[in-house]
Amino acid sequence: MLLTQTHSVAATEAAGEAFARSVQPGWVIGLSGDLGAGKTAFVRGFARGLGCPGRVHSPTFALLNEYTGGRLRLFHLDLYRLNSADDVRGAGLEEYLTQPDGVSIVEWIERWCGDAPATEGSEPGTRRRIYLRCLDENTRQIAYDCAGA
Ligand SMILES: Nc1ncnc2c1ncn2[C@@H]1O[C@H](COP(=O)(O)OP(=O)(O)O)[C@@H](O)[C@H]1O
Ligand SMILES: [Mg+2]
């Protein structure tokens, strides 16, 4: 686990932006962390790092937002409103969680795969998992799980 702390929204966005530089086609990046942990902030920076123009907003109701115009096509998913992997399949989202035609970044990934790395149906080495945690009002811990890398 690679741990870092941020002390502002901008710093969490910058972490997402930096992470985007290493991203390869077909990756699925799972984000875990409570409401307000900074997942969407991380995605905002991530989209910027890919060079996607346009404002990132949470896809909690849409479930999926797609951003084009960057280095890779970006799928931003938020599974908060789904309860299980079956729900995720029922919503037609499975391909975005296994073999995206671009890169997927997924809030509430545990709705899909719990704590497991979720390699089923996906190419080896394409899963990443990031845990965000609120330490105090303005401080967030970001933990990059390198397993599966
Ligand atoms: N260091 C920080 N990193 C990210 N967000 C922070 C930080 N400090 C305070 N915040 C606040 O926490 C909230 C994070 O919201 P958001 O990114 O939508 O979280 P999530 O998507 O995990 O629910 C925002 O209101 C933001 O202003
Ligand atoms: Mg969010």
Image (cartoon, helix red, strand yellow):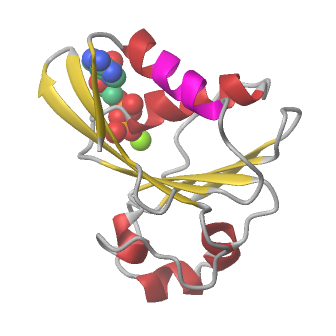
Using the image as rendered, state which of residue 67 and residue 30 is in the foreground.
Answer: 30
Q: Is residue 34 left or right of residue 109?
A: left
Residue 11: image quadrant is top left
On the image, which quarter does residue 72 sit in? top right
Picture quadrant of residue 53: top right
Task: Name above or below for residue 114 compared with residue 27.
Answer: below
Position of residue 82 in the picture relative to residue 58 (left or right):
left
Residue visible at 46% across and 35% down in the picture:
40
Q: Which residues are magenta?
A: 13-20
Query: Residue 92, position in %: x, y?
Result: 66, 79
Q: Residue at x 37, y 71 (%)?
A: 111
Residue sitting nearer the eye, 55 or 138: 138
Can you see residue 60?
Answer: yes
| Count of numbered circles on the image | 0
- Magenta includes 77? no
Magenta stretch prevailing secondary structure: helix
Decide whether residue 19 is among the magenta residues: yes
Q: Residue at x 62, y 72 (%)?
A: 124
